[in-house]
Amino acid sequence: MITLSDLRTSLLDLLHELQKTEITLIIGGGFGIYLKTDYVRRFGIRTLLQELPESRSTNDLDLFLRPELLIASEKLKPLSRALNNLGFRVIPEAAKYQFVKPGPGESMTGSIKIDLLTGPQGCFKGTAAKADDRRVRPNPSIGLHAHPVNEVPTLEEGLLSITLDGKTSQGINYTGNVFVPHPYSFLMMKLFAFVDRYNDANKEYGRYHALDLYTIVAATTEKEWDEMRRFRGQMHSDRYVLQAESFVEKYFSAMNSMGMIRMRESRYCRPELQLDKFMSIIQEIFLHVP
């Protein structure tokens, strides 16, 4: 089983390979949320909620690439080499933007998966890169694509820099920096992910995405709360923000709504979590335009 420590080591391996390049990584997904919660806990930073869930396990690293790297694709060549050097292989069904590193004995048990993602398709309008709903293809090609995430128009806004230090898998002491998205960006992504999966038995009915929403809100600082309200005011007419608003109203406005049911079904949910306060905050963000 992959642990959060394994993912940390894998990310340090990648950062070590990418040192002295122009590539900076934005870490999304469950591991990005873990990095944020670990950050506020380590530094004792005051956040919107006091009760945080246990960090959930995952075997994925969601790496968001700044659109500028896909537009000036020569800068991405070191990432292609790094993935190859570290033993990551292309996943055929998602060629060039999903990779896997098999576990011991070439087994998929204990494997680590990397997804390459980027900002909305609109970021690539008028550039040499080719973008559709599924992938962005740099031009000239460098053997890497990225999946565009249209529901995160604020991807590069309010990023938090986090320092990672520790040993690589080769036992080398290394310190590197990554960024994690702003809580507003995380909430947008997780709302859409939940709605895609809440009826899917193969995806645990989206329970982990529902609880991720709680964790994102709980780990939000007072400064980030003010920024969220500003982003919401600026983006109030964006069609994805309007969809997110409808998702909150439908799935997270009452204890008997499906989002809250799925949240309580999660094995990481505990009775002491401040679910009522969570609902109040997420509604304040999305249903009350400043």
Image (tube, helix red, strand yellow):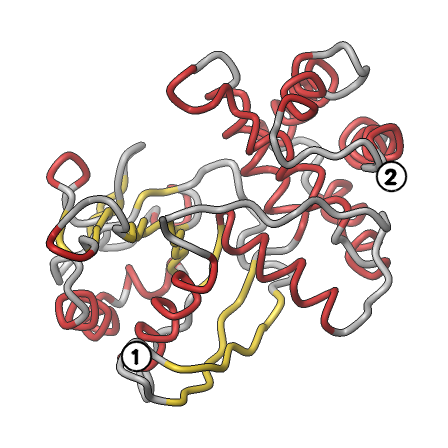
List the residue tagged with mark 1: 18
Mark yes or no: residue 259 visible: yes
Across and down, in percent, residue 198 comes to 52, 17
Left or right of 85 in this view: 36: right
Q: Nearer the viewer, residue 80 or 11?
A: 11
Residue 127 location, quadrant: bottom left
Q: Residue at x 38, y 70 (%)?
A: 9
Q: Residue 46: percent from the left, percent from the top?
A: 86, 62
Image location of residue 258, percent across then percent down:
66, 13
CA–CA distance in space, label 1 to label 2: 41 Å
Within 10 Å of disc 2 (Cα), the crowding (few <14, some 14-19, many 20+) is few
- Answer with left or right where residue 5 lies relative to residue 55: left
Q: Tag on residue 290?
A: 2
Is label 1 in a helix, a strand or a loop? Answer: loop
What residue do we see at 49% from left, 71% from top? 178
Q: Is residue 104 left or right of residue 25?
A: left
Q: Quadrant of residue 234?
A: top right
Quadrant hosting residue 45: bottom right
User: 98 above or below 287?
Assistant: below
Q: Residue at x 20, y 72 (%)?
A: 82
